[in-house]
Amino acid sequence: MVKRFLAKTALVLSSILFTLGAFDLTVYLFPRQLLPGPLRNLVFLMDGDTYYVKDPPIGSMIRPHTDYVFPGEEFSFRIQTRLNFPNTGFRGGTLGGPAWGAAFGDSFTFGAGVDQEATWVAQLSRLTNREIINFGVPGHGPHQYTRIFQKYGVGLRPKVVFYALFSNDLKDGVRFEAPQANRRQRMTAKRFMKRYSASYNILNNVSRSFRKRWTHERRNTIGLKLLDRRLRDPYGIADRKFASAWAGIARQIENAHDESKRINATFVLLYFPQKEEVYWELAKERIESIGVFKERVDRLRKTIVAFCGARDLLCFDLTPTLKARGLRGEIFYFPVDIHWNENGNRLVAQEIYRFLLEKKLI
């Protein structure tokens, strides 16, 4: 009886595995443009390497002549590289003509979640009526911002260089400075399945949607989710590594500033606050770790302001405005995703424009 049951179970499992394997093979061999929309989007997300290229010593860069719609759970947006070099592409400009400004940063500068025309860079271009080139690349850190400026931005001879920092830049800097062997991700079974198995990803997405239904998401009173891991650890690194991580970033800022002076460009250092910095006070009664967060959250911002003062750099901190208006109920970020929505990008562009006017840069 037990043997018969085990044999039938093994047969059923074998049939399921065979079916899933056949499905994965079909998806792999089938022309992508003929796949149904949701499945085509899933394959795109699995096959991220297709849309990125290596660019030593910078790292992964967006492939030139890229043009596709990114499918996300909260948004979809078009990624089009309008400034293309032989081996990499950037979102580039929007108005045309010579580059008056150049913006360097990560996904917040790139404008993850919104079409190019809605990014703060494009909106600032329209406000100033001057072309500003978007060199932002999702996932990058200051070591890469500076290298991109030196390799791709300097030749455009911009009049103003915008260099944007975000809280995870400390972690990005530590990772970039790690030995090459430590940067490589080991190919585990889970990573292999996520990379190559459509059926695994479909089942994983279904499972995740069920978990979301039964899991209480910690959101503040206006419906924005604040991430527990960021509330526990705003920067993603241990306290003892803060000083050395910041020293690495400071060197990159100074290199970019020196490069700006060499081409007679004005260097503007921007600080972009994370969602938790802006909205944590609306949820502090429900966050056990808020005491630790309150002690740590201002450390990077204050360090940047002090750094700018000591070196006489132009520095603009977006935190006060975003926080003041956010605490009044305005929503500048996506409900779950960490990035700015169109309203957030609009406010940032307006505030930077006001800053430029005050400093008589336009």
Image: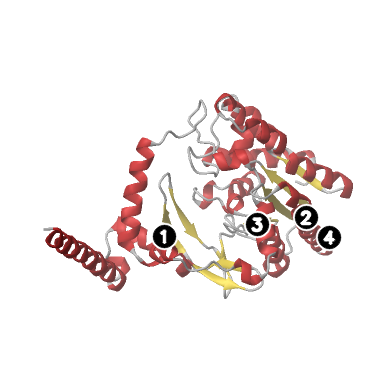
Between disc 1 and disc 2, the foreground one is: 2
Please, which colouring scheme is shown?
secondary structure
The residue that label 1 is drawn on is 45
Determine the residue positioned at 81% across, 58% down. Answer: 254
- Identified by mark 2, the residue type is Ser
Between disc 1 and disc 4, the foreground one is: 1
- In 3D space, how far apart are the residues under numbered discs 2 and 3 (Cα atoms)? 13 Å
The residue that label 4 is drawn on is 261
Closer to the chain start, of discs 3 and 4, is 3
- In 3D space, how far apart are the residues under numbered discs 4 and 2 (Cα atoms)? 26 Å
Which labelled disc corresponds to residue 313?
none
Closer to the chain start, of discs 4 and 2, is 2
Determine the residue positioned at 71% across, 52% down. Answer: 162
- In 3D space, how far apart are the residues under numbered discs 3 and 4 (Cα atoms)? 26 Å
The residue that label 3 is drawn on is 172
- Identified by mark 1, the residue type is Leu
Is any atom of residue 165 visible in this view?
A: yes
- In 3D space, how far apart are the residues under numbered discs 1 and 2 (Cα atoms)? 35 Å
- Identified by mark 3, the residue type is Asp
Name the secondary structure under disc 3.
helix
Q: Position of residue 4 (x, y in %)?
A: 12, 62
Which labelled disc corresponds to residue 244?
2
- Identified by mark 4, the residue type is Lys
- In 3D space, how far apart are the residues under numbered discs 1 and 3 (Cα atoms)? 22 Å
Between disc 4 and disc 2, the foreground one is: 2
- Please, which residue is most extreme toward the bottom here? 86
Locate the N terminus by quadrant.
bottom left
Name the secondary structure under disc 2.
helix
Name the secondary structure under disc 1.
helix
Between disc 3 and disc 4, the foreground one is: 3
